[in-house]
């Protein structure tokens, strides 16, 4: 009984193998004949190659077919690429390119005024201004320097004009007045 089961199994496997081979041959599109290579060769169109007029004619047949299949390198031209395609190994990034560096750095600017206006006193034609900077208080008249950094140039109803001495830059400090409340 075991032998009969073994034979049946072998027959099934043999049949499956035969079916697989037939399916593979059918999918490949060949009829399985010995001259299948010749049939493909016969259906291939052949180009006629004419020798240049200054050279003698060559042999026909298989040599002419081989010559037709070879590339004629002297007739090929080199491709021309744009300048952007030149360096394919350059560093590439998704980040936008940095802005171009300016030729001159911007001129230095004076620091913002840190003075606090406390008040003023006018006696005759002389005006004194009370200013505070951090923990220090200053009483200044027009033309006087403050810590060798600032000079008070003018005082009017709405502003005090100071000059930052290291850069000789004028700055305005707004003070309380009509329409300008601190």
Image (cartoon, grey):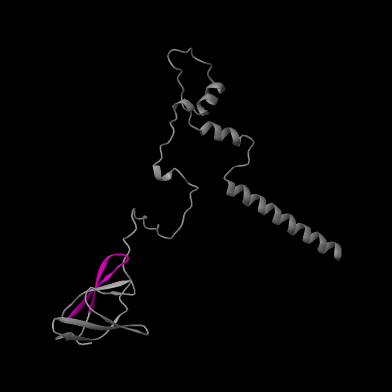
Quarter occupied by residue 10: bottom right
Report the quarter where the N terminus lies.
bottom right
Is 1 on the left or on the right of 95, as rendered?
right
Q: Is residue 12 magenta?
A: no
Quarter occupied by residue 79: top left
Question: 55 or 158: nearer the eye?
Answer: 158
Q: Locate residue 164, reporting x and y percent.
A: 29, 69
Q: Is residue 72 visible?
A: no
Prevailing secondary structure class for the magenta stretch in the rendered image: strand
Please tell me whether residue 69 is drawn above or below residue 32 in the rendered image.
above
Q: Is residue 173 visible?
A: yes
Quarter occupied by residue 151: bottom left
Q: Locate residue 130, reporting x and y percent.
A: 26, 84
Please tell me whether residue 1 is drawn above or below residue 122 in the rendered image.
above
Question: 172 or 95: nearer the eye?
Answer: 172
Is 172 on the left or on the right of 107, as rendered?
left
Residue appearing at x 43%, y 44% in the figure: 85
Is 3 on the left or on the right of 104, as rendered?
right
The magenta-colored residue range is: 157-173
Q: How many marks?
A: 0
Question: 103 or 20: nearer the eye?
Answer: 103
Question: 111 or 26: nearer the eye?
Answer: 111
Is 168 on the left or on the right of 16, as rendered?
left
Residue appearing at x 76%, y 57% in the figure: 11
Q: Locate residue 122, reporting x and y percent.
A: 17, 85
Q: Locate residue 36, reporting x and y percent.
A: 60, 37
Report the quarter where the C terminus lies.
bottom left
Q: Is residue 159 magenta?
A: yes
Residue appearing at x 63%, y 41% in the figure: 32
């Amino acid at each position: 009984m075991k032998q009969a089961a073994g034979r049946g199994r072998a027959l099934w496997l043999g049949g499956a193998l035969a079916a697989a081979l037939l399916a593979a041959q059918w999918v490949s599109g060949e009829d399985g004949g010995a001259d299948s290579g010749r049939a493909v060769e016969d259906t291939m169109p052949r180009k006629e190659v004419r020798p240049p007029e200054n050279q003698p004619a060559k042999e026909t047949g298989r040599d002419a077919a081989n010559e037709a299949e070879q590339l004629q390198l002297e007739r090929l031209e080199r491709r021309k690429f744009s300048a952007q395609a030149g360096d394919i190994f350059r560093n590439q990034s998704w980040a936008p390119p940095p802005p171009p560096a300016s030729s001159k750095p911007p001129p230095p600017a004076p620091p913002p005024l840190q003075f606090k206006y406390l008040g003023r006193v006018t006696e005759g034609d002389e005006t004194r201004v009370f200013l505070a900077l951090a923990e220090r208080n200053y009483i200044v008249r027009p033309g006087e320097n403050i810590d060798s950094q600032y000079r008070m140039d003018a005082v009017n109803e709405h502003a005090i004009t100071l000059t930052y001495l290291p850069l000789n830059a004028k700055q305005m400090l707004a003070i309380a007045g009509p329409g300008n409340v601190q």
